[in-house]
Every structure is written in structure tokens, then in C-alpha cells.
């Protein structure tokens, strides 16, 4: 079944790469006529999802997610020559103020730790029980551990995932929704880890697992939204989670925060899929 036809090859290849990445199999076909570059839908049961994605592509074919899909498949499709290119990921990140704000906050806290202020920062950012917070009103401590990191590998791993996934969510749902997801996943994962091990923990990992779960389930429940994680990445997430519980890593891992963050992200995606079209 023919899905759409273009007069130029570049947009046809770009859309084909993205649809195939979303699990909607299409084949590029060249024919004669005014619009010779066609996309053939191989699974008619996925017509509605393919139609919605195609409409979104026609409205704005320069969205970063299309070029990103091409890169993930080892291709780079350029709609027209440009004098200066900025990576789609960087473009999306620069349009994502909440994502940038969290990146900067974590970076500044880590720099302060390297300058000898780690003890003071840990004191002011550590989690405290709700009963104690009701007395001292230091409510920022509910989120504080998310900004505290203990090594270069720790912060680089977390911020790379946050930058990639947070900017995608913010681009699709807006800054307010990403802020809500950040607050909820940080709150749930921090509180669960506090109940399990006490206040001596830190890192953005609970939130990172939260946005991973959110993007993963959005791709499963609403593929037309354009958010997804590939199966190898989902496998990596779950493998790393199991590895932490097996106590085979060389560092102490906040397994409870990771698990609760992942589950809360999945549940938030389920909620969004029910209330948003």
C-alpha cells in the first residue's frame, strides 16, 4: 500500500528511516511521474500510526528526531545544503531550558565538590525525613540528592542520558511537563532510597531511569508521539539494573532509586497516554 510520494528523494528517505525505526516497516520505491519517490507501507494494520507520523513529518520535516533516526541507522540525509550545520541533538538541547537548567545545576554542584566543598554541599542537599522537614521547612532536600554526584564517571553518565532524553521530552511535551516529570521521579526515587539506606546517597540516576521509563513506554503505548528507545537500549537499561542488584559493580549503586525511578517513569507515561491525544 502506497503511503506517500515525494518529488525529491531526501524527504522520502528521511521519513522512511524514521518509520522503520518506529517499527513501521516501509520500503522506498522509485517510479515515474511528478512524484517519483514513494514509500510503500508493508503492514496495512499500522496504517493509522504511519499516517499520523507522516502528517507530523509534512508539517515540520526538520525536526531533530528524523535526522537522529537516520544517524542511528548509519545514514545522514540532508534536505538542502546549509553553510553551517549544528547537530540536531544540540539544537534540541538549546531549545530545552529545563534540561539545561538541571545540567548546569548538577555541573555547578560537582565543580563545587572538586573545589573542596563536598561536605558542605552534601550536608545541604542530603535527604531528610518528612517529619523533620515539616519542622525546618528545608523542602529542597526532597530533590537535593539528584544534584549531588560522587565521581566524574557518575556525573557524565547521568548527564549524557538526561541531556538526550530530557530534551526529547521537553521538545515534545514542553518545559512544564518535563519539570513535573523531573520533580516526581526525583521525589519518588529519593524517598524510596532514603527508606532503604538512609540519607547517604546522591545522583541523578533515579531521574535518568525515570525519563528512560517514560520514553520507553511512550514509544510502546503511543508510537505516533515520536518518542522511543530501541530494543538494545531497553535491554541495556534492564541489564544494568540487574547488574546493580547482583552487586558485581565496582561502585555502590542506589538500586532502589533506579528501580523506583524506572517504575515511576513508566507509570507517568501510562498516565500521559490516557489523558493526552
Image: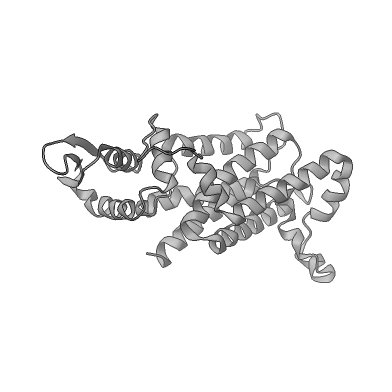
* Residue 76 x, y percent position in the rendering: 39, 33
* Residue 212 x, y percent position in the rendering: 52, 46
Q: Is residue 264 visible?
A: yes
Q: Residue at x 84, y 70 (%)?
A: 135
Q: Residue at x 58, y 62 (%)?
A: 180
For the N terminus, the quadrant is: top left
What residue occupies the far left of the structure in this picture? 32
Q: Left or right of 152: which side holds 35?
A: left
For the C terminus, the quadrant is: bottom left
Tell how many labels. Answer: 0
Q: How is the image coloured?
A: one colour
Report the front residue among 186 and 147: 147
Tell me which corner region of the image, top left, top right, bottom left or bottom right, holds residue 153. Answer: top right
* Residue 270 x, y percent position in the rendering: 45, 59
Tell me which corner region of the image, top left, top right, bottom left or bottom right, holds residue 79. Answer: top left
* Residue 134 x, y percent position in the rendering: 79, 70
Tell me which corner region of the image, top left, top right, bottom left or bottom right, holds residue 181. Answer: bottom right
Report the front residue among 97 and 120: 97
Q: Left or right of 61: which side holds 9?
A: left
Q: Left or right of 171: which side holds 192?
A: right
Q: Is residue 201 visible?
A: no
Q: Residue at x 57, y 49 (%)?
A: 94
Q: Residue at x 76, y 39 (%)?
A: 150
What residue occupies the far front of the structure in this picture? 83
Above-or-below relation of 127 to 132: above
Report the front residue among 259 and 49: 49
Amino acid at each position: 500500500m502506497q503511503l506517500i510520494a515525494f518529488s525529491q528523494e531526501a524527504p522520502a528517505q528521511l521519513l522512511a528511516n524514521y518509520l522503520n525505526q518506529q517499527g513501521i516497516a516501509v520500503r522506498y520505491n522509485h517510479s515515474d511521474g511528478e512524484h517519483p519517490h514513494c514509500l510503500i507501507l508493508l503492514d496495512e494494520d499500522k496504517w493509522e500510526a504511519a499516517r499520523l507520523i507522516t502528517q507530523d513529518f509534512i508539517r515540520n520535516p526538520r525536526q531533530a528526531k528524523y535526522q537522529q533516526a537516520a544517524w542511528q541507522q548509519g545514514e545522514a540525509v540532508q534536505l538542502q545544503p546549509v553553510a553551517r550545520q549544528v547537530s540536531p541533538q544540540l539544537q534540541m538541547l538549546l531549545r530545552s531550558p529545563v534540561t539545561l537548567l538541571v545540567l548546569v545545576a548538577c555541573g555547578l554542584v560537582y565543580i563545587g565538590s572538586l573545589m573542596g566543598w563536598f561536605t558542605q554541599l552534601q550536608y545541604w542537599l542530603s535527604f531528610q525525613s518528612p517529619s523533620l522537614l515539616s519542622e525546618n521547612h528545608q523542602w529542597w532536600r526532597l530533590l537535593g540528592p539528584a544534584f549531588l554526584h560522587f565521581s566524574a564517571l557518575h556525573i557524565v553518565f547521568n548527564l549524557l542520558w538526561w541531556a538526550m532524553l530530557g530534551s526529547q521530552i521537553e521538545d515534545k511535551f514542553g518545559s512544564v511537563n518535563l519539570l513535573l516529570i523531573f520533580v516526581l521521579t526525583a521525589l519518588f526515587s529519593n524517598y524510596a532510597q532514603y527508606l532503604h539506606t538512609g540519607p547517604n546517597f546522591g545522583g541523578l540516576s533515579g531521574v535518568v531511569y525515570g525519563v528512560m521509563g517514560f520514553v520507553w513506554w511512550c514509544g510502546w503505548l503511543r508510537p505516533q508521539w515520536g518518542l522511543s528507545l530501541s530494543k538494545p537500549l531497553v535491554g541495556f537499561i534492564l541489564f544494568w539494573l540487574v547488574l546493580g542488584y547482583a552487586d558485581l559493580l565496582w561502585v555502590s549503586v542506589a538500586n532502589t532509586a533506579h528501580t523506583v525511578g524506572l517504575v515511576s517513569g513508566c507509570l507517568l507515561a501510562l498516565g500521559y497516554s490516557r489523558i493526552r491525544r
